[in-house]
Image: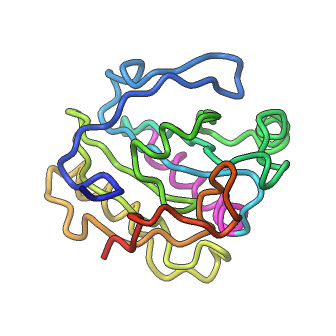
Amino acid sequence: MAFTLQIGDPAPDFELPATDGNTYALNGFKDDEVLVIFFTCNHCPYVKGSDESTRATVEKYAPKGVRFVGINSNSPNTYEEDSFDNMVKRMETYRFPWLYLYDRTQDIARAYGALRTPHFYVFDKDRKLVYTGRALDNPRDYTQATVNDLERALDELLAGKTVTTPVTNPIGCNVKWEGKDAHWMPPEACDLV
């Protein structure tokens, strides 16, 4: 079985605390036309380098019924900057327009097969996976990006079309797994294409 969710797979359920003090589960988003789950964190230069591009994407697509939910699954024992307290501080500072959830046990990262930060998953109204991978071809410096695969996938989905490139490789830092070296990845994890 593949490590990462495959196109057509259902969104795995979750119940996670958020930086806004609430707890969220998958069924809490049932009224949203499209759900984008993305694995992110506080310290990664690829996340930091593309956060403002992600903000622009959220602001562009939220009015069209697309909900964005960020999840941090990184072990704070690898980078203390990725702790829940620091997640709260980061959201207070930057006021990002997405929910920011904490996956302390890393069970949700395993369920989705998150490879890197950032790693995006787009689910249709039935919560079937229609796109997974990167947003930008240069997330470390979004001003140098030439392709936005996430927006292309969202445009096609919202237009009622099939996503022409449903899988790309996420570009970023690997998820920081508890008790493992900072560069360790599960042996079954691999490039998606």
Q: Residue at x 34, y 49 (%)?
A: 122
Q: Position of residue 135 (x, y in %)?
A: 47, 65
Q: Which is more toward the observer, 55 or 174?
A: 174
Whether 192 is drawn above or below 41: the answer is below
Is 169 covered by the magenta stretch?
Answer: no
In terms of secondary structure, what is the magenta stretch mainly? helix
Residue 83 occupies quadrant: top right
Residue 14 occupies quadrant: top left
First to last magenta residue range:
46-62
Q: Residue at x 56, y 42 (%)?
A: 70
Whether 59 is drawn above or below 134: the answer is above
Is 57 covered by the magenta stretch?
Answer: yes
Position of 10 compared to 59: left or right?
A: left
Q: Quadrant of the N terminus?
A: bottom left
Q: Which is more toward the observer, 85 or 149?
A: 85
Position of 8 compared to 102: left or right?
A: left
Q: Position of residue 54 (x, y in %)?
A: 57, 56
